[in-house]
Amino acid sequence: MAYWDSKQGKIVRQPDEPVSDYPGWVWEDCGCSGGFRWGGDFPADCISCGGNGRLAKHLESGALALYPGGPLMGRSMPVEVK
């Protein structure tokens, strides 16, 4: 799951990992803090992943879901972080 690297001053995301029982799907790091939103006055579940810390991504279509074949959450787009 993602973490803050204070030396580099950026959020470090984990690489995608295949979903063993679902070919064509991978687990993608949501980018939140272990299922919690970054910042704020108190811990709150991430609204993107529902507190899982990762989303299922269909490799062919780029569709994101809470789990393979589950509720769709949009589509993965390449993000360039500077």
Image (spheres, rainbow, N blue to C red):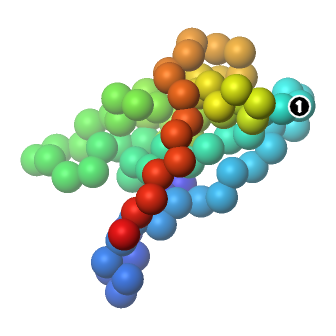
Q: Is residue 72 left or right of residue 59?
A: left
Q: Nearer the viewer, residue 65 or 34?
A: 65
Quadrant in the rendering for residue 20: top right
Q: Is residue 82 visible?
A: yes
* Residue pictured at 62% horizontal, 25% vertical: 63
* Residue pictured at 75% horizontal, 49% vertical: 17
Q: Position of residue 45 (x, y in %)?
A: 33, 34
* Total numbered badges shown on the rendered structure: 1
Q: Position of residue 40 (x, y in %)?
A: 14, 47
- Badge 1: few (under 14), some or many (20 or more) residues near its Cα, within 10 Å? few
Residue at numbered disc 1: 23
Q: Position of residue 77 (x, y in %)?
A: 52, 40
Q: Nearer the viewer, residue 61 or 64?
A: 61
* Residue pictured at 20% horizontal, 52% vertical: 39
SS type, badge 1? loop
Q: Position of residue 44 (x, y in %)?
A: 26, 37
Quadrant in the rendering for residue 62: top right
Disc 1 residue type (three-letter): Pro
Q: Nearer the viewer, residue 71 or 40?
A: 71
13, above or below 8, in the image = above
Q: Which residue is farthest left?
A: 41
Q: Is residue 80 left or right of residue 9?
A: right
Image quadrant in which the C terminus is located: bottom left
Quadrant in the rendering for residue 27: top right
* Residue pictured at 64% horizontal, 14% vertical: 70
Q: Is residue 74 left or right of residue 45?
A: right
Q: Nearer the viewer, residue 19 or 59?
A: 59
Q: Is residue 34 visible?
A: no
31, above or below 82, in the image = above
28, above or below 55, in the image = below
